[in-house]
Amino acid sequence: MRILVSGGSGLVGSELINTLNYDGHQVVQLVRRNPDPEASAAEHSWDPEQGTLNTTPLGRIDAAIHLGGVPIFGKRWSSSRKLLIRESRVRSTRLISQSLAALPQPPRVLIVASAVGYYGDRGEEPLTEESPPAEGFLAETAVKWEKATDVARDAGIRVVNARFGLIISRRGGLVGKLRVPFQSALGGKMGNGRQWWPWISLVDVVNALSYLIGKESIFGPVNLTAPTPIRNEDFTRLMAKAVSRPAWFNIPKPVIKLVLGQMGEEMTLYSQRVYPEKLRASGFVWVYEDLAENLHYELVSSRADRWGPKRPG
């Protein structure tokens, strides 16, 4: 297939492009700079901020995967930062949806990244794709983000809104940032540690995206999480065990809110007991349902350095 990918330089995008190329697909990557003629994937420039995407040179596109948006985790959420987080997602998603919908022969499927932040802080409530959104910045952002795909859906394109959970990788995301503190015996539970964290391995994210390209019966929101969400206190215990260090440096909720603000509260303290009901019902098979095994592979095994997240067969 000829597959269009945006956000290909990120943690998920770079692994996804490698996998798609390995599987024999032709990848066209949207970039915000001048295209590199020596890149492993064909490159095509676009400018989401200016609303420009010339689709004429693209040729036939069978499927598209949009992973764009500035990082959510990292800097404190000032008013300007929150606007940038939201607009970078909504504008780019609307642009790619409109552009693909206007093609003489639109792609069969458009997969757009979203987030489990859609569900907000829900305590012990089991959450599936049928659960409604809640309040909060991430929830409101995810609603607008997903709605920006409506124009593609109205044009007859099968749209999948992939709601990502916490991605387990030594090379990025929350785990990438926690790795050094935990290895320095400065890790610990956040708040009371009872909040649910919906996690997923990087290899399963990539496998799920590839799977969804060809699974014509699946559309709309899809939770990209492992079927085994875990409480933060149990995550902390397994992370400490993986790096063979104690995890005594617990961080009280007031400290998190003081130091990290709203970002820390929504990203680490919100409880989201999310289950990937659509993937499970369709027969998708996870490589990692056991977080301990996944953490050991990412944080201990030398194979992660040689092979990355995709385990050799």
Image: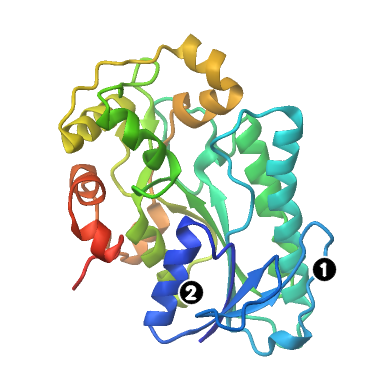
Tell me if residue 287 can be seen: no
Q: In 3D space, how far apart are the residues under numbered discs 2 and 1 (Cα atoms)?
A: 25 Å
Residue 52, numbered circle? 1
**Residue situated in front as seen by the camera: 181 or 194:** 181
Instruction: Measuring from the top left, give residue 7's x and y in whole percent.
Output: 59, 62
**Residue situated in front as seen by the camera: 253 or 223:** 253
* Helix, strand or loop status at disc 2: helix
* Image quadrant assignment for residue 272: top left
275 left or right of 162 in image: left
**In the image, is residue 206 above or below residue 78?**
below
Residue 115, numbered circle? none
Q: Residue at x 33, y 15 (%)?
A: 250
* Helix, strand or loop status at disc 1: loop
Q: Residue at x 20, y 60 (%)?
A: 303
Number of marks:
2
**In the image, is residue 2 above or below residue 53?**
below
Say what amino acid the circle numbered 2 marks.
Answer: Ile
Residue beneath label 2, please?
213
**In terms of sequence position, does the residue under pointer 2 or pointer 1 come before the other?**
1
